[in-house]
Image (cartoon, coloured by chain):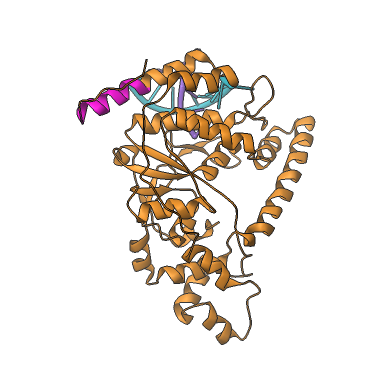
Chain colours: A orange, B purple, C cyan
Amino acid sequence: MGTKLAAIIEAETLTLSDLTGKEIAVDAFNTIYSFLATIRQPDGTPLTDRQGRVTSHLSGMFYRNINLLENGINPVYVYDGKAPKLKAPEVQRRRVIRDAAYEEWKKAKEDGRIEDARKAGQASSRLTGPMIDESKELLQALGIPVIQAPSEGEAVAAQMAREGFVWASASQDNDSLLYNCPRMIRNLSISGRRRVSRTKKYKSIDPELILLDQNLQLLGITREQLIDIAILVGTDYNDSVKGIGPKTALKLVKKHGNLETIETDRGTKFDFPYDEIREIFLNPPKFDLESPKWTDPQPDEIERILCKEHDFSESRIQKSLERLHKALEEIRGSTHQSSLSDFF
DNA sequence: CTCGTGCA
DNA sequence: TGCACGAGG
């Protein structure tokens, strides 16, 4: 994941209202994982229904999207498909870390180490098949389109932005840029409150806009070179090169031009198939896009999924749906005069 | 993460 | 009205 790139990438701070009227492709797995990690009790216990099934992702998906729609923002969620073969070691590595975190979570809870338990609980998050299915179901009930990518979701989200199906793509890591996404958004959330690590304090986090061309120009490199920099600092498909951070990687690539020349000039070979890794970003599987369609929310269906199936409070859900209804009426009233069909 | 309550 | 903090499922 291209998170280390953040150190050399310039972002512009936005407010949510800057995004009103915009269509945005959202990396679904990325979003669900962040909900599973954060929506927990202080000791790391996730929200569950009476049958013990985790519901943190549904809570996050519901309230986040109610707020986006209320602000006139149209999200479309892109789900990951089959991971590229080169990702297998990374997937396995994450599984090992997650399983260890789960054991540590149970221990820390028993010992009453609340803070340790919270951290371990967060790191133990697992995204299961049923979670994928029911989050899709909930989105569809909200009238939000869902796209199943053949492979990496970020690749399809980037393609959607590049081909003008959406205005931007939203994700927490910078891989979108490597996939040639012209505009990407970080921190697409509402309250903008994030816990500062280890303390109990919160700082506000605003959405940020990152422009690909502007950043390439500022850095004086091409996208191909940005990909080489990403490979040097480590991707999902290769380990980082020891001793090379984003700043050094930038210097090296600017000085030598590309990874081949760095190898020649240094007289050592990299121990990963960088040409194959480049291909993942430069030529992701071809995907025929269709224009995403947003429809009216179906309150009955939403209440069935959340309240009947998963024990959410009927009054809370209804209250949010009413708020959304009012906001949508206003949005539609001010543009074209159509009213919401089949909504209350 | 976002909501709702309670207190300044 | 604004912020802090605990609850939500």
Q: Nearer the viewer, residue A312 or A302?
A: A302
For the record, the magenta segment spans: A324-336
Q: Position of residue A166 (x, y in %)?
A: 35, 47
- For this view, does A271 lie left or right of residue A183? right
Of residues A218 and A171, the one nearer the viewer is: A171
Quarter of the image for the C terminus of chain A: give it.
top left
At 61% from the left edge and 41% from the top edge, which residue is drawn?
A198
A335 within the magenta span: yes
Image quadrant where residue A89 sits = bottom right
Residue A285 visible in the picture: yes
Q: At 38% from the left edge and 34% from the top edge, which residue is drawn?
A: A68
Q: Where does the image place residue A43, in percent across and percent down from the top left?
A: 68, 30
Residue at 68 percent of width and 37 percent of height: A121
Q: Name the residue nearer the viewer: B1 or B8.
A: B1
Q: Is residue A258 above or below residue A69?
A: below
Q: Is residue A245 visible?
A: no
Q: Is residue A271 left or right of residue A16?
A: right
* A180 lies above or below A101: below
Please provide percent x and percent y for residue A256.
48, 81
Total labels: the figure holds: 0
Q: Is residue A94 left or right of residue A18?
A: right
Where residue A51 sits, quadrant-wise, is top right
- Assign the N terminus of chain A to one quadrant of the image: bottom right
**A67 displayed left or right of A47:** left
- Where residue A82 sits: x, y (%)? 59, 52
Report if residue A81 lies within the magenta region.
no
Q: Please identify the dominant SS of the magenta region.
A: helix
